Amino acid sequence: MLLRQEINKSLYGTLGAAHFALLFAIWSLLAYGQLVPASLLPTPGEVARTAVEMIRDGSLFEHALVSTFRVTSGFLLSAVIAVPLGMLMGTWKWALGFFEPMFGFIRYMPASAFIPLFILWLGLGEPEKIMVIFWGTFFQQVLMIMDVTKNVPLELIEVSYTLGARGLSVFSRVIIPASLPGIVDTLRITFGWAWTYLVVAEIVGASSGLGYAIMHAARFGHTGKIFVCILTIGLLGMITDLIFKFIYNTLFAYQRRGT
Amino acid sequence: MWPKDVKLSIQGVSKTFNGGRSSVEALKATSFDVREGEFVTILGPSGCGKSTILRIVAGLTEPTAGKVLLDGREIKGAGPDRGMVFQSYTLFPWLTVRRNIEFGLELRGVPAAERHAISEHYTELIGLKGFEEAYPVSLSGGMKQRVAIARALANDPEILLMDEPFGALDAQTRLIMQEILLKVWEESRKTILFVTHDVEEAVFLSDTVHIMTARPGQIKETVQIPLPRPRTYEMKDDPEFWRLKKYLLDLIRTESLKAV
């Protein structure tokens, strides 16, 4: 078989579905066959019953809503700063020289290590949770946006000079449209990372949210609930991924042949 | 006194690239003039600094010494009076063929109706009527370069600079592109400064050919191409064409051997 050879679409889809089915089968076997005790691994039926229960009493929706709000706030706050700053860094060397070393330094400090400080500074409310997600997302995001902008081909910028573009018009007419696909893709990837910081943010001092619900359920040994919450996070992540992919394909249709 | 028919004057232009402790002399002091409406080619082996001359004229590279005059005025930085076509594909992928051609006009704030009339004219001239709304991704390499030429011309520059514009194309497409370029040139009467390493291309297109030495580059010899115009591809079988081609080949072979 040749490496990177294309396979047809239905086979591709079947492979993905098969993986889900396989994992589900292994889970069922372990749980229903009581190879793993029920206190550690709930059965699919148990998880489904818990899900129905949590949907009926509205708690799942409430937790999901709170968490989505936190993730989205932290992510948007990060993106609002990271996109313009990253583009600046990728375009003007003095901005790169000023920001990159510090961001590269902070990037290696785990966001979770800052939680005690954020609690001291911001208290236990929403700002602290949003700050954790922001902190975990921003430094990676800004460096990735910088990289996207840096990779705009120099020839595109040069040819725009010879066509009469100057300073700001080069930025608005060449650098922005040329880096936009990469930026949307970076946002899609980093949104996923923002979700991973959610649980970290909700471990301490929270009274709602999917991360809180997971910690709470663990304390009472409700593994079914933990499963429902984790699956919900996965589902929400997948939905945002699809939304970003849809936006990408709609905005950047010009990248495909035959348009 | 500025001679009346001189369009571009390159006067003692040289370039040394400084890379930390080492510096590379890319171009020795070079001078030549380009007359109004003339097709001038700089022919040389790779790495001889011929593209450097073009980039200096375009204002994309600062010369170490010397100056470039366009219509008697010294050039400072890049500007729309010197259109450029690069070897690599430089169409804006997010713009249609029409909007690529209109890019410079849009920047200058030319009204839409006038813009469309100009882009329509050039789209027809390069033989891409019907492709106005296509995006670059669906064009062949030859088509992309034709649009790049149209985009530069639509801006009505004083001179058109072409840096091995057909270098990335296959041999057959190259030949056709040369004929299209001649047609466009004859129609637009633009002054063209062209860079290539292809001897046949230089003879077929040019009025004047400057042959460059290997690095550090300088003009080794200047040859006039007195072949009649308009030129057709059948002329490539002419004894005179063969004689000129052979003469230039011998000159450049010596330099290419040094560069290998």
Image (tube, coloured by chain):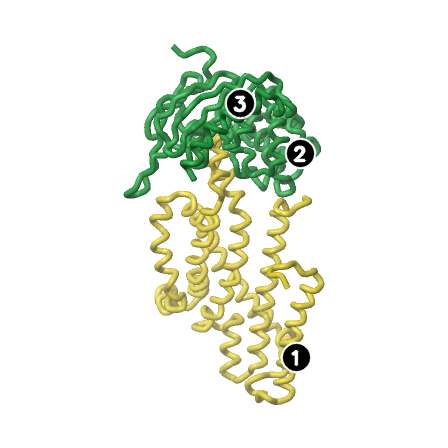
- Mark 2 neighbour density, 10 Å: few (under 14) some (14–19) many (20 or more): some
The foreground one among B36 and A259 is B36
Q: Residue at x 56, y 26 (%)?
A: B153
Chain containing the residue with disc 1: A
Q: Residue at x 56, y 39 (%)?
A: B168
Letter of the chain in green: B
- Mark 1 neighbour density, 10 Å: few (under 14) some (14–19) many (20 or more): few
The picture places residue B90, in percent across and down from the top left corner, at: 54, 38
- Chain A: give its colour: yellow
User: Element at badge 1?
Assistant: helix
Residue identified by numbered label 1: A25
Image quarter in which the N terminus of chain A is found: bottom right
Numbered circle sitting on residue B132: 2
Dot placed on the residue nearer the N-terminal end, 3 or 2 = 2
Residue identified by numbered label 3: B244
> On the same chain: label 1 and label 2?
no
Query: In the figure, is residue A1 to the left or right of A142?
Result: right
The picture places residue B193, in percent across and down from the top left corner, at: 49, 25
Chain containing the residue with disc 2: B
